[in-house]
Amino acid sequence: MSKGVPDGASADPVRGAAQYAENCASCHGADLEGQADWQTPDADGVLPAPPHDRTGHTWHHGDGLLFDYTKLGGEEMLKRMGVSGVKSGMPGFADSLADQDIWDILAFIRNSWPERERAIQRQRTEAEH
């Protein structure tokens, strides 16, 4: 699992906003709101895209997991985590986004959260190390 932004690199939330709009907003919403009924699987058993604002669960996870989930996609990450019986519609972006692009997108998302959620998410990131 990735351990965070590589040494010497910094994430750019402004650049991340543009990358998010281009690569993520079509599923997760222009305002990070996610898809309707995101906690209820569709007819194929796939969960709709969750919100990335404070109403979702993104801030419940550390940076490493979020990075890997974005890079590898939901199916691969769930498999690696030993989770079965859950279908993910999240594609992997390893072939279309550079690692820095992913870190920038995550910085943009993280900047949208209130301080309480950011603090909890920082603790989860630290626990990954």
Image (cartoon, rainbow, N blue to C red):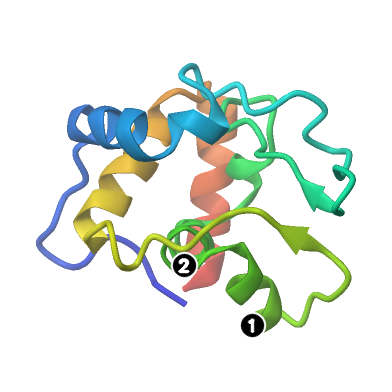
How many numbered marks, from 0 up? Answer: 2
Q: What element carries label 1?
A: helix
Image point (57%, 26%), residue name:
53
Considering every residue shown, the one lying at the far left of the view is 8
Work out whether 46 lies above or below 23: below
State the mark number for residue 80.
1
Q: Which of 11 and 44 is in front in this view?
A: 44
Say which label, 2 or 1, has the lower sequence index: 2
Task: Mark 2 and mark 1 in contact? Answer it, CB < 8 Å.
Answer: yes
CA gap between label 2 and label 1 equals: 10 Å
From the viewer's perspective, tell me whether residue 87 is left or right of residue 79: right
Residue 4 is left or right of residue 98, and the answer is right
Question: Residue 20 appears at what percent x and percent y?
Answer: 35, 34
Left of 6 or right of it: where is 32? right
**Which residue, given by chain and number where applicable, does mark 2 sit on?**
68
Q: What element carries label 2?
A: helix
The amino acid type of the residue labelled 2 equals: Asp
Residue type pointed to by label 1: Arg
Query: Which residue is drawn at the image coordinates 47% and 77% (left, top)?
Result: 1
Q: Residues within 10 Å of mark 2 (few under 14, many from 20)?
A: many
User: Which picture quadrant has residue 25?
Assistant: top left
Q: How crowded is mark 1: few (under 14 residues within 10 Å), some or many (20 or more)?
A: few
Q: Where is residue 119 in the image (x, y as percent from the top left)?
A: 53, 38
Seen from the viewer's position, the closer of residues 94 and 4 is 94
Farthest residue toward the front? Answer: 43
Q: In this view, does 76 lie above or below 115?
A: below
